[in-house]
Amino acid sequence: MPDVAKTDAKTPCEKCHGTMKLVKIEPLFVEPDMMQHTFVCENCSHQAAFKFGKGLLG
Ligand SMILES: [Zn+2]
């Protein structure tokens, strides 16, 4: 997982450094305390998934 600052809704693209938008949030069955956030880049359509702890979202 890249160590970059990001919000829940946007994150920098690792391929083209464009803006990736949040398109999907889904639970992780293997990690009940985590939610997987799927992002898609507006520029190059690269997809990436990041896990966030539910506790961090309040
Ligand atoms: Zn990109």
Image (cartoon, rainbow, N blue to C red):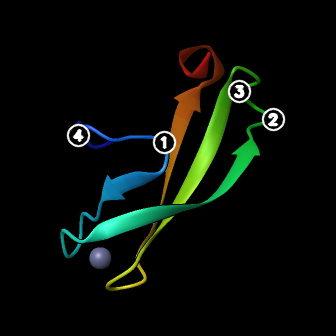
Identify the secondary structure beneath mark 4.
loop
Give the labeled residue for mark 3: 31
Residues under numbered marks 1 and 3 in contact, where contact means CB atoms less than 8 Å apart = no
**Lower sequence index among marks 1 and 3:** 1
Mark 1 and ligand 1: say if the CB distance to the nearest ligand atom is below 8 Å. no
Query: Gap in Å between the C-alphas at discs 2 and 1?
Result: 20 Å
Q: What residue type is labelled 1?
A: Asp
Q: Position of residue 12 (x, y in %)?
A: 27, 58
Q: Position of residue 56 (x, y in %)?
A: 53, 17
Q: Residue at x 34, y 86 (%)?
A: 44
Q: Which residue is drawn at 54% across and 31% down?
A: 52
Mark 3 and ligand 1: say if the CB distance to the nearest ligand atom is below 8 Å. no
Q: Where the C terminus falls, by quadrant?
A: top right
Q: What residue type is labelled 4?
A: Val
Quick one: label 4, few (<14), some, or many (20+) residues within 10 Å?
Answer: few
Residues under numbered marks 3 and 4 in contact, where contact means CB atoms less than 8 Å apart = no
Give the labeled residue for mark 1: 8
Q: Which of 11 and 29 is in front in this view?
A: 11
Q: Which residue is drawn at 61% across and 13% down?
A: 55
Q: Where is residue 19 in the image (x, y as percent from the top left)?
A: 31, 67
**Lower sequence index among marks 4 and 2:** 4
Query: Gap in Å between the C-alphas at discs 3 and 2?
Result: 5 Å
Q: Which amino acid does label 3 sit on?
A: Glu
Quick one: label 2, few (<14), some, or many (20+) residues within 10 Å?
Answer: few
Identify the secondary structure beneath mark 3.
loop
Query: Gap in Å between the C-alphas at discs 1 and 3?
Result: 19 Å
Quick one: label 3, few (<14), some, or many (20+) residues within 10 Å?
Answer: few
Give the labeled residue for mark 4: 4
Residues under numbered marks 3 and 2 in contact, where contact means CB atoms less than 8 Å apart = yes
Residue extending farthest bottom? 44
Mark 4 and ligand 1: say if the CB distance to the nearest ligand atom is below 8 Å. no
Identify the secondary structure beneath mark 2.
loop
